[in-house]
Image (cartoon, rainbow, N blue to C red):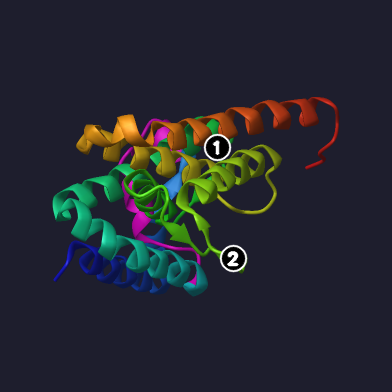
Amino acid sequence: MTMTLTIVIATVAVTIVAFRNHRVFAALMMDIEAVLGARGEWWRMLTSGLIHADYPHLMMNMLSLLLFGRWIEHAMESWRFGLIYVFGIVIGSFASVIVHRRNPSYRAVGASGGVTAVVGAATMLAPDAMMAVFPLPIPMPAWVVGCAFVVFSIMGSRWGGDNIGHEAHLGGTFAGITLTAAFFPELIPYHWPYIAAMLASGAAATIISRRMLRGGGWQR
């Protein structure tokens, strides 16, 4: 059994159990107050990736993981793939903790940080690979999709109100790119322009979103 399939089966199983047992769900979810409070339950930054908000949320993440994970695992070996997935969840959760540290009622669940880390790894390995992203009907190079995703995540994180963990997605994406670059440093001289484009897109989105917020262009 591949690492990808093992992760999918384990995540589906734990999520279903959590749906039926609220105590399990509450014990595993990302809870800012529990993480930063006196209890110091930092492990929630990882276990929150084992449960999901509902079945569509679970299906979307696991389908994405299957589509990208099997190829990435084959390209870089199972242990590297597994490390990238786990690292993505933890870094994604850490990004959420930083952004929402003053909101003790913040809660989050889902494996999106790990999934976006795998997608980030795919972007680093093959930036010219064509990707078809729903609902866009036209396939685009992975690095273009990456730039668009970074902009969407940063703007969405600052805008808020859509119940999506944009900061976790962004953290997971860069975790996947960074760890893949560490595993395969020989790719950096060839692929650095694509990564630079993603970083530039993120910087531009950050500057624009700050100016829009200061100017009252967005209302939460």
Question: How many numbered marks are there?
Answer: 2
Left or right for 172, reference 218: left
Q: Position of residue 101 (x, y in %)?
A: 52, 31
Residue kind at label 1, given as amino acid type: Pro
Tell me if residue 81 is in the magenta stretch: no
Of residue 189 and residue 208, the one placed in the foreground of this image is: 189
Which badge, 1 or 2, comes first in the chain's sequence? 1
Left or right for 175, reference 201: left
Q: Residue at x 78, y 30 (%)?
A: 213
For discs 1 and 2, the disc positioned in front in the rendered view = 2
Q: Residue at x 38, y 30 (%)?
A: 38
Q: Position of residue 181 (x, y in %)?
A: 28, 35
CA separation in Å, label 1 and label 2 = 41 Å
Q: Which residue position is annotated with label 1? A: 104
Q: Position of residue 153 (x, y in %)?
A: 58, 44
Tell me if residue 48 is in the magenta stretch: yes
Q: Residue at x 59, y 46 (%)?
A: 148
State which region is magenta. Answer: 33-54
What label sits on residue 138 in the rendered view? 2
Crowd tier of the residue under label 1, counting other residues whose Cα lies within 10 Å: few below 14, some 14–19, many 20 or above: some
Q: Is residue 44 visible?
A: no
Residue kind at label 2, given as amino acid type: Ile
173 up-or-down from 48: above or below: above
